[in-house]
Amino acid sequence: MSLNWKEINLVLQELDLPGAQIQKAVQSAFDLLILGVHKKGETRRILISLSPGACRIHQTFRAFPKSGKPLRFAQFLNSRIVNGWIEEAVQIGEDRIVRLLVRRGERRYRLYIRLWSNAANLIVTDEEGVILDAMRRLPGRGETGGGHYAPEDGTGTGKAGEVPQAPKTGGPEKRFEIRELPGEGSFNGKIAAFYEEQGGALSLEALREQARRTIEGSMGRLSAALEKLRAKEAEFAAAEKLRQYGDLILANISSIEPGGKWLETDNFFSGGGKIRIELDPRLSPAAQAERYYGRYRKAKKGLAVIKEEIAGAGAELLVLENRLARLLEETNPLALAKLLKTGGVRAGPDQARDKKRPGLSFMRDGWLITVGRDSAENDELLRRHVKGNDLWLHARDFPGAYVFIRQRPGKTVPLEILLDAGSLAIFYSKGRNNGEGNLFYTAVKYLRRAKGPRGLVIPSREKNLHITIDEKRLRELEHCRC
């Protein structure tokens, strides 16, 4: 239920906003904003919703959580209008556009709240109507920074320079009236109670909050793990000093006394100056050096592993960020509820066949690309989820993922799809840190299972391909996850 123009007028009359100070702006979703206002010793929260079918402005009596990540428009409002004073709050005619005039210091701003279900927006302009920012940036309407918006003067924005008109939802004879809502008290209170009761589990606000809690929790745990990995990376990065200690010991082997605990010598690696190196009294000088060399080799190997883990965790974090963004952009509550049941992953055209498919799946221009990230997933994909004419790719000389491109009848795999799959094969292999690598590919029917570890195959009729990892291509593929 969106508010009609008469209900909006009643809401504004009850709110009595002129003379109130805006104390904060909280954007808990891309289409939901809370303004904290203070007047005559009372602080109230004004909810502005741009959700389709639920466009409204009214006082809310419950707290809305902040977004885990500060959203752009709220940051803009906090920099411009927070601590400003509302001088006027009116509806423009019967068009369901609320105009707030806000003064902060010597500057005045206009906030236009357009409560149209098919084109809702909140636009901030200066006194001349120049758009400073919009809650929804709509380039097709010109509703972006630098555009012009002044609907009271008939100079709004629109396609081909046309002024957008309020949608006629009820026909020319429709007479809007203030609806009777259950409950007692003010109309603002009845509206708030109605949405709290009717919104329930399928309200966009509740579903988006569920998405944030679920995915941001995973992102928080992953970020904490990343911090620990980076701390280990910094620790291993000092491995070069261990090699230098070994070199310095060998360079001074004749001056080391048996049973000595320290070697004090000139550090020719740093251009001079004294350095003290701890020794094990039980070891000979040569064994002392080898001890430091051994620690150096171990740290160097550990650093390579840590870097690989950091890269993998970073890629997984990007996947979660993109998944959350897709969920929050969904405007259909039923569709969002369905997405949440599947973890935010959109179903591909072959979901019935592949609902238990392991690994990662990407749908690019109608081509399904599947990645098995370890031997178990590789083996499962080979046994149950690919066919003979599907294409198999694997990094040469490095252990890693099997990547499959599902064959489409009568179609040849395009070069771009081949490059996409090749990039994934290199990225999910031990050769990722090289930034490039060679791979071979062939049809699944030309793979022969080999004795040994699970999933091991011997290819024939294979072709070669050299891939340089393209970060832009990988980012685009993340948006194609299915």
Image (cartoon, rainbow, N blue to C red):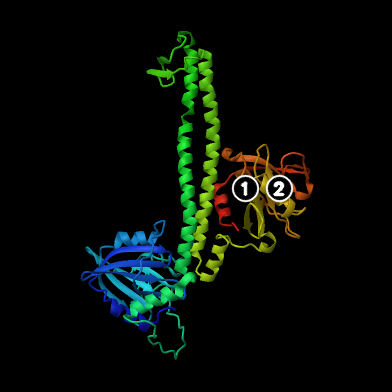
296 up-or-down from 248: above or below: below
Q: Which of labels 2 and 1 is toward the front? A: 2
Tell me if 458 is positioned left or right of 139 in this view: right
Work out whether residue 314 or residue 260 is closer to the camera in this orientation and state it: 260
Count every numbered label the image shows and give the total: 2
Residue 321 at what x, y percent from top left?
Answer: 49, 54
Crowding around mark 2 (Cα neighbors within 10 Å: few <14, some 14 to 19, many 20+) is many
Judged from the image, the secondary structure of the residue bearing numbered disc 2 is helix
Can I make out residue 380 in this image?
yes
User: Reading the chain from its start, which is encountered first: label 2 or label 1?
Assistant: 2
Judged from the image, the secondary structure of the residue bearing numbered disc 1 is helix
- Residue type at mark 1? Leu
Name the residue tied to disc 1: 424
Residue 304 at what x, y percent from top left?
Answer: 55, 35
Residue 292 at what x, y percent from top left?
Answer: 50, 22
Crowding around mark 1 (Cα neighbors within 10 Å: few <14, some 14 to 19, many 20+) is many
Q: Quadrant of the C terminus?
A: bottom right
- Residue type at mark 2? Asp
Residue 323, which numbered label?
none
Name the residue tied to disc 2: 379
- How far apart, in angstroms, are the residues tagged by discs 2 and 1? 18 Å
CB atoms at circles 2 and 1 under 8 Å apart? no
Tell me if 21 is positioned left or right of 194 in this view: left
260 up-or-down from 336: above or below: above
Residue 127 at what x, y percent from top left?
Answer: 29, 69
Residue at 65% x, 50% y: name it: 371
Residue 150's image quarter? bottom left
Residue at 45% x, 71% y: name it: 51
Residue at 65% x, 47% y: name it: 422
Work out whether residue 286 or residue 173 is closer to the camera in this orientation and state it: 286
